Image (cartoon, helix red, strand yellow):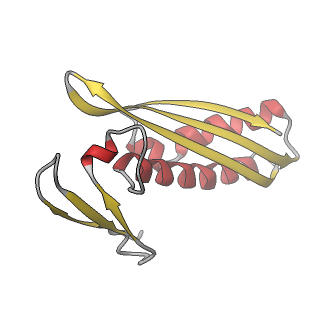
Amino acid sequence: MPTRTARTAWNGTLQEGAGQVELSSSKTGTFEVSFPKRSADEAGGTTSPEELIAAAHSSCYAMALSNEVGKAGGTPQALDITAEVTLGQVDGAPTITKIALTVRGEVDGLDADGFQQAAQAAKVGCPVSKALAAVDISLDAALE
């Protein structure tokens, strides 16, 4: 199986410094990061580890769900997945406290119960979900 790489170059202190994270394997972009913007309500044009985790989780989950729908006898026409990754405080330290997956799907060949079963199986089987097992992950899945 492949290994993917990202690289971050950082200059300065936590509060006054900043960095750039580069998606090295795909070479699709370099993005600004900073702790003050990471912990602010508005991102201000920078990304964060939480946003990158959300991107990884939503895309991995989409793949896992399309597989589970197919295994259940359905055909996914469209899947819209949002992952919200929350940075909070635990014992005074920044901590990822929860992840909320929201899924809306257009699927042929499965009823609402079948879709729910596939959605739950995808949550359990998604490699990123497994990697993030220490975090509370909620799932809101429905057919449109």
57 left or right, relative to 92: right
48 left or right, relative to 63: left
Relative image position of residue 26 (x, y in whole percent): 44, 76
| Depth check, front residue: 22 or 141 | 22
Relative image position of residue 18 (x, y in whole percent): 22, 58
Which quarter of the rendering shows the N terminus? Answer: bottom left
Identify whether 86 is placed above or below 75.
above
Identify whether 104 is placed above or below 19.
above
Q: Residue at x 11, y 51 (%)?
A: 13
Relative image position of residue 60 (x, y in whole percent): 54, 53
Relative image position of residue 115 (x, y in whole percent): 76, 37
- The quarter of the picture where residue 4 lies is bottom left
Identify whether 80 is placed above or below 118.
below
10 left or right, relative to 1: left
| Depth check, front residue: 95 or 30 | 30
43 left or right, relative to 94: right
